[in-house]
Amino acid sequence: MGTLLSVENLSTYFKTEKGISKAVENVSFHVNEGEMLGLIGESGCGKTTVAQSILRLIEYPGKVVSGSVYLAGREILKASEAEMRKLRWKEISVIPQSAMNALNPIYTIGDQIIEAILLHEDVTKKEALKRTKELLEMVGIDGDRWKSYPHEFSGGMKQRVAIAMALACKPKLIISDESTTGLDVLTQAQIIALLKDLQKKMNLSVILISHDLPMVTAICDRIAIMYAGKIVEWASTEQLLKEANHPYSKALLNATPDLNNLDHEVTSIPGMVPSLVNPPLGCRFQSRCSLALERCSQESPKLMEIKPRHFSACFLGGGNNG
């Protein structure tokens, strides 16, 4: 299983009235072929900015200031905008946070999917319509509903249409950005189960961005934990659940109810994510960490391999003790 996407030392900053916000700083991770990677953290930790940076959708006052992004070995941060327009949908596609905003209310859902196919595939409109019906069937919607307008669908069905659109040009990588936010719990479960089923059947690579740790641990192969613009821990789901190392990862797990362990005491994380305009000098989690050392306020720990394929950025983790 080879690496499909490799993100290396990615940094994205934004100019604000208060100064430069270091929204993403020196982020590195990779996604293998046919793998689902969960990117998780509280709101404001930089997850969506990472996705937009990969897709080259950062606009002024934001800017990718350093780093590299390789898709199947090709450096896409250096690609021209014309080349990126070809890559989007065809190589990488997105399931947006709100299907309501992603779908144009004045066009049928079929016309919107057909348009995406015709823009990127050398096919006739008849062939694109056939593909559209197949996609709708694939996500559990009657193919004949291609003539329907977005307002004729429920929230869950709109999200299924958004998934169908993301699959329209048979991409290698899909980024799902909080794509079940706003849906009821039952519909969320159905959408996530559908996405996992399609990922397995089509051997897709998926980056699943979320703040919902139980959902991510249930379906992802590996998980990267983000805090205040940085990756603080990165491991297989099994490793993270059994041997979480970073205090923030442990705090997220402790803040999550465990239905398999009714004795598990749920505890909240005190404080809030620091401003990224003036982030702390040392570890960005130090002010909320009960285990913080004096060193944590002076030095920023590096993300290091503490066990095979298990990385953590903590002075207590074994990799930063030198």
Image (cartoon, rainbow, N blue to C red):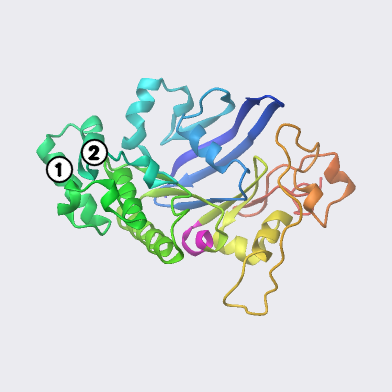
Which residue is drawn at the image coordinates 72% and 49% (left, top)? Answer: 272
Q: Is residue 176 magenta?
A: no
Disc 2 versus disc 1: distance between alpha carbons?
15 Å
* Residue 126 at least partly seen: yes
Depth order, front residue of 268/252: 268
Depth order, front residue of 123/164: 164
Q: Is residue 230 left or right of residue 94?
A: right
Q: What is the quadrant of the C terminus in the image?
A: top right
In the picture of the structure, the residue carrying the numbered disc 2 is 107
Label 1 secondary element: helix
Q: Which tag, 2 or 1, sits closer to the chain's start?
A: 2
How many callouts does the rendering have?
Answer: 2
Q: Main secondary structure of the magenta part?
A: helix
Region rendered in magenta: 215-221
Q: Is residue 45 left or right of residue 164?
A: right
* Residue 262 image-quadrant placement: bottom right
Q: Is residue 198 left or right of residue 245?
A: left
Position above or below: 52 against 295: above
Label 1 crowding class (10 Å Cα cut-off): few <14, some 14-19, many 20+?
many
Marks 2, 1: nearer the viewer: 2
Label 2 crowding class (10 Å Cα cut-off): few <14, some 14-19, many 20+?
few
Q: Specify the amino acid type for callout 2.
A: Tyr
Query: Could you say where residue 227 lies in the image, as x and y percent from the top left?
Result: 66, 46
Which residue is drawn at the image coordinates 45% and 46% (left, top)? Answer: 97
Q: Specify the amino acid type for callout 1.
A: Leu
Label 2 secondary element: loop
Position above or below: 35 against 277: below
In the picture of the structure, the residue carrying the numbered disc 1 is 129
Query: Could you say where residue 126 lies in the image, as x and y percent from the top left?
Result: 10, 39
Query: Could you say where residue 30 lies in the image, as x and y percent from the top left?
Result: 51, 43
